[in-house]
Image (spheres, grey):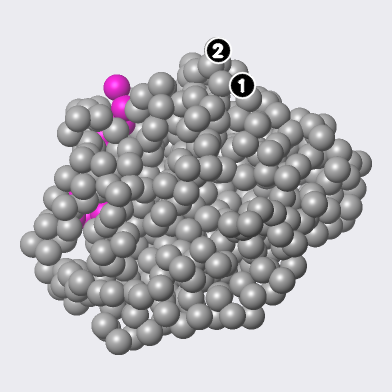
Amino acid sequence: MPLHPSIAALAALAPLPLASTPHRSVGARIALLGAIAVLGAAPTFAQPVTGDLTLLTTVEAAAALCQGRMTSVDLVQATLAKAKSKPQLNAFITLDEAGALRAAQLADAQHARQPRGAVCKPLAGVPIVVKDNIQVKGLPASAGTPALKGFVPTQDAPVVARLRAAGAIVVGKTNMHELAFGVTGYNPAFQSGTEVGVRNAYDVSRVAGGSSSGNGAALGARIVAAAVGTDTGGSVRIPCAFNGCASLRPSIGRYPQAGITPISHTRDTAGPMATSMASVALLDSVIAGGAAAKPADLKRVRLGVVASMMAHLDADTQAATDAAIKKLEAAGVTIVPVEMPKLDELNGAVGFPVALYEADDDLAAYLAKYRTGVSIQQVAAGIASPDVKGTFDALVIPRKLPAPTGLVDAKPVYDNAMKVARPALQKLYAATFAQNRLDALVFPTVPTVAPVANAESSSPENFGKLIQNTDPGSNAGIPGIQLPAGIGATSKLPVGMELDGPAGSDRKLLAIGLAIENTLGRLPAPD
């Protein structure tokens, strides 16, 4: 049965995983399947896919399902079993075992009824997970906060509806930094393990990152191969940096935002996350429309390096970043040192003023529109995380912002951010790309590997450090991709690499990401 064109193209191009022998065997078999589909030939082997099915990427799984080499029921059962075997990660708030298995049975039945030669849906029978601030019909959408744990939406958010229309099966809703107001996932409100907070797939003593924390942990642990999260200042990129996965923060406006618990309409966006960049490209093609990107020619790629984004790196991040950039240069990439004067100053004038001011109106409107039955005051009263509670009580609800002289009224600062600072930040990025003929900027996604999981990990000082590089592009509304740069030599933890491109260059950025993944490879699954 022919593959959907997006699957066929990507399956042939997906790099082999750098993991155990069984993982490599499965990946090789499915990559071969995709290549055969591209050539239009019938498969030359009839063996079913064997081994750990959860090690397949989304592209590989879609190809195998389309060719009838495994069933959706088997894949979903393997996913659910692995999810239940790792409660210590605190990755899930809700697992929809019955619903996912029903959907898998239906997908298999539909596949069996398809006439020979029919084109498969891009994600037919493929399991995904969804961050718990994105609405999925019939499942709670808690946004990681106690006051909303009983809110059950009656419709899918549009991003979920598009994925499900393409055949995806939602197996569960993932844990997150409470109300998406943080980047560690240290949330005491929901836990399946004995320790607080979502935990890192490579070392459970470390944080998973956030705010799409459960997605990052589930992907890193190879529980599932694809997820959809949200990103306001780094929330699909930081968890993938810490857990060795790939993600896209799209240009603002590329994806619909309805049905998603908001922070800031200016900064918020949904974003795909996956165990491979090829799978991220496939998810993007489903959500945004159009064919999936194909790998770029690295010999024609120019990447800029800004000194301030290479600052404050720990030793593992510095070494992994330097090694990755050397590999890119060896592959033909042109690296260009560039300057971005006043980047930090402009970013600081936009980030908190916009997010904290818009949060009050945007969240209140969301709670009323979707008939959640609670007010923003009730949500604030029930917040479980001390860092988020303090932010809401001191800043969001009273609409104040910190200043050198104390707290000040947020409205004038917000107006300056929107009318002066943000346009200047966007102009700075546009000029940097144009004047240096850059395809993107390249930098370590986070300056350090994942910190130890405790309450201090969510301190204001740590928050500022962890968003050092992800926040500026977020405030400018430009797209950014995250992919693994390597494993820290001392920590043995993943190190992430980000590329930020001009506004609207999402497909080109994904194409560069595909080529870089082919050069750097993917990380092995954790032991």
Judge by depth and name the residue closer to the eye, 334 or 431.
431
Residue tagged 1 = 191
Is residue 42 rendered to the left or right of residue 280? left
Residue at horizontal 41 percent and vertical 77 percent from the top: 429
Start-end of magenta stretch? 517-527
Crowd band around label 2 with a 10 angstrom C-alpha radius: few (<14), some (14–19), many (20+): few
Q: Secondary structure at mark 1?
A: loop
Q: Are marks 2 and 1 in contact (CB under 8 Å)?
A: yes
Which residue occupies the extreme left position in the image?
Answer: 330
Q: Is residue 144 above or below residue 274?
A: above
**Where residue 438 sits: x, y (%)?**
28, 78
Q: Is residue 123 left or right of residue 171?
A: left
Q: Main secondary structure of the magenta part?
A: loop
In the foreground, 64 or 99: 99
Seen as rendered, the residue at the extreme bottom is 435
Task: Give residue 192's position: percent from left, percent from top.
Answer: 59, 18
- Name the residue located 12 percent from the left edge and 57 percent from the top edge: 326
Residue 102 or residue 115, whichever sits in front: 102
Query: What kind of residue is marked 1?
Result: Gln
Q: Is residue 311 visible?
A: yes
What residue type is disc 2 on? Thr
Image coordinates of residue 505 in percent, x first then y, are 42, 75
Where residue 98 sits, quadrant-wise, is top right
Q: Mark on residue 510? A: none
Q: Position of residue 315 (x, y in %)?
A: 21, 40
Residue under pointer 2: 194
Q: Is residue 85 left or right of residue 513?
A: right
**Was residue 518 drawn as part of the magenta stretch in this picture?**
yes
